[in-house]
Structure formats: structure tokens, C-alpha cells
Image (tube, rainbow, N blue to C red):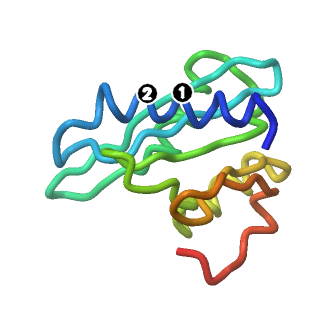
Amino acid sequence: MQDTDRALVQAASAVARLRCRSARHTVAAAALTSDGRVVTGVNVRHDGGAVCAELVVLGTAATQGAGALATIVAVADRGRSIPPPCADCRRVLLDAFPDIRVIVGTGTGTEPTVLPLADLPTGTP
């Protein structure tokens, strides 16, 4: 992982610590734009459904005129994990940014890995 990837994980982790303090918000995401900006967001859960943090980041990036996203990561609250995007998020991200890279956890005590989203194993949730 490059230093910029580690900084992105740190950014998502900081947002998770600060903003994911209830059952309504349990995952934070951060994305690096092609022009070097970092955009963050948290998921929104409700009895009527949920919106993943990655999709909130896409909306935030669009609102800020950020352009293309280069790398994205999601971090679960309380340091639980660095999960891969769900199937719906994968589809949206691949449609919008076919070359996007994703940072995913590889297990306890090991450094996360970075790979093109298109190369993420299909068996991963």
C-alpha cells in the first residue's frame, strides 16, 4: 500500500470514530479523487432501508464537483473491519468509475490490500 492509501484508510477511520456512534451510522467511507481531494461519508440505516457509505461518498463527490474517483475504502465502526463494497455498490462504482481501486481488509493484524475493483474476487460479500 502507498502512503496515500494509508492516509485514505486513516481518513475513513477518523470519520467512523467521530460520526458512527449509533445504529443509524455504522460505516464510514473515504475516496481519493483523481485531482487529489479526499471525500468522505457515512452510511444511513433506517427501518425503511439503508444507503451504503460508498454511495454517500459518490453523492458528496458529485455535489463538490470532484470528478473521477481513483480509490475508495470503507471502514466499519469501532475498528471492526475494512469490508469490500457490497454487490450493489460494486455495480454502481464500476459503472461510474471502471478503473477505481478499492482498499479491503485482509485479516486481523495484516495490512489492507489495494486492487482494482474489477479484480475483487466475486465470492467476497
Question: In terms of image quadrants, where is residue 42?
Answer: top left
Residue 81: image x %, image y %? 45, 56
In the image: residue 90, left or right of residue 125? right
Is 92 rendered above or below residue 36? below
Residue 114: image x %, image y %? 76, 52
- Look at mark 2 in the image and give the residue it sits on: 14
Q: Nearer the viewer, residue 20 or 42?
A: 20
> Is there CB contact under 8 Å for labels 1 and 2?
yes
At x 69%, y 20%, the residue is 66
Residue 109: image x %, image y %? 55, 57
| SS assignment at label 1 | helix
In the image: residue 62, left or right of residue 18? right
Q: Nearer the viewer, residue 69 or 4?
A: 4
**Mark drawn on residue 30:** none
Task: Report the amino acid beneath label 2.
Answer: Ala
At x 29%, y 29%, the residue is 19
Looking at the image, the residue that sits furthest to the right is 99
Is 76 rendered above or below residue 110? above
Q: Dot 2: within a 10 Å radius of its alpha carbon, few (fewer than 14), some, or many (20 or more) residues?
A: some
Residue 13: image x %, image y %? 46, 35
At x 42%, y 50%, the residue is 52
At x 53%, y 33%, the residue is 59
Name the quadrant of the N terminus. top right
Is 17 rendered above or below residue 80? above
In the image: residue 103, left or right of residue 98? left
**Mark drawn on residue 11:** 1
Q: Nearer the viewer, residue 21 or 3?
A: 3
Q: What's the distance in space between the residues labelled 1 and 2, CA to CA?
A: 5 Å
| SS assignment at label 2 | helix
Q: Nearer the viewer, residue 30 or 112?
A: 112
Task: Report the amino acid beneath label 1.
Answer: Ala
